[in-house]
Amino acid sequence: MRKFLGFIIAAAALGTIGIAGCAGVPSGDQSSSPREAARADVKWDDDGSGYLTVNNNVGDAMILFAGTINNSHILGGVRGLASRRIDFFNQVTESSGTFLLRAVKETAYRSKGSNLASDDIVFAGLVVFDKNEPRAIQVNINKVLGGDAFVIIQNDTNMALQIRIDRPDGPTLTTLAPLERNKKVYMDFNPDGYFFFPVYEYYDRSSMGIRSIVAKDLADGIPMMPVIPGPGRDAPVINFEARPANLFSPFATLIVTNETSRGAYLLEGSSRKTNQNGTTMINPGSETYELNLQKQERLKIGGLRIDLSLGAANTIPVPEYEYEAGFNYQVRIRQGLPAEINRLGKSDSDDFGIVLVNER
């Protein structure tokens, strides 16, 4: 992750890259014509060495892109209601960084090429990578996407904006790039509507990871019913509070350092927690987790355990501890010894922003 840190800081010095959704979709320096897109050779089978798995939970075949929409950034395709393992290393020249994976219906890209509207992007999700320390990554295309109804969502920040539904830590609906506005999100019609929860993602230089923040006055989300386009029907617009003064992090960052010779799991009750790399196992070394403090500034959390797969009686309990929102903590694990918790300091929130590769 240290090389990732160097990349982010260097890129940040050049300025955060944003997208103006109202002007269509950026296609980078190598725009592809409809003729070129129609002839694009798209792979649909698993890559044996792929670290990225995309689960397509909608019925349409999708073409996937690492960043902007053109033939040079095609990751391959994933068929409807299917999964695909992808090797994306050739589509990003940087050794580490973050890109926005975009999914477009195959029929739309083949007919329009790079001349797509923002509406044509069915799904987008953040992928954080480090070629020197590759980790398994999993992305899910939500089953409610790609329907006939839509809402418009705005992102007025230099951060990535994840839209989650059902609950604040619920499944990701899609992700907006920095400054992406007037984004139409097409989804299944639901007469009861949906609850939309904003989660902004920025880079924290103090702990070299991605951090999540939300709006204080929108902690319970915004209810809205997507509408089917038609005469006299106004499009519902969702604007989230995006001023830094009204954003906060209801999370504490927990770095689990495994100093044993075995892989381990962080358990919450009987469930394995997923770390920021999208995996559950902690090899010897460190992995980073976000602890949800349930909208509170401080919360005492107990019941965490480390499982070294030596039997239930030999799990290592993590001491009950009062965590503070926006702070970093480390748990050291050594076989045969109690777990130790250390407070490392406050997360860096001086510069809310994220840099995405392949956006030019």
Image (cartoon, grey):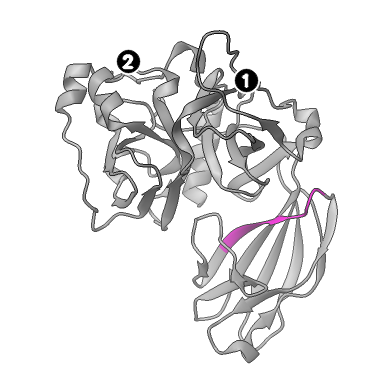
Q: Are marks 1 and 2 in contact (CB under 8 Å)?
A: no
Magenta-drawn stretch contains 290:
yes
Which SS class for mark 1?
loop
Magenta-drawn stretch contains 18:
no
Q: Residue at x 58, y 37 (%)?
A: 162
Residue 246, placed above or below residue 262: above
Tell me: 80 left or right of 187: left
Magenta highlight range: 287-295
Location of residue 259 in the rendering, given as x and y in whole percent from the top left corner: 57, 76
Q: Is residue 27 visible?
A: yes
Tell me: 12 left or right of 37: right
The quadrant in which residue 179 appears is top right
- Badge 1, how many Cα within 10 Å: few under 14, some, many 20+? some
Location of residue 170 in the rendering, given as x and y in whole percent from the top left corner: 61, 48
Residue 42, placed above or below residue 299: above
Query: What secondary structure prevails in the magenta region?
Result: strand
Q: Which residue is mark 1?
A: 236
Q: What is the three-letter code of the residue carrying label 1?
A: Pro
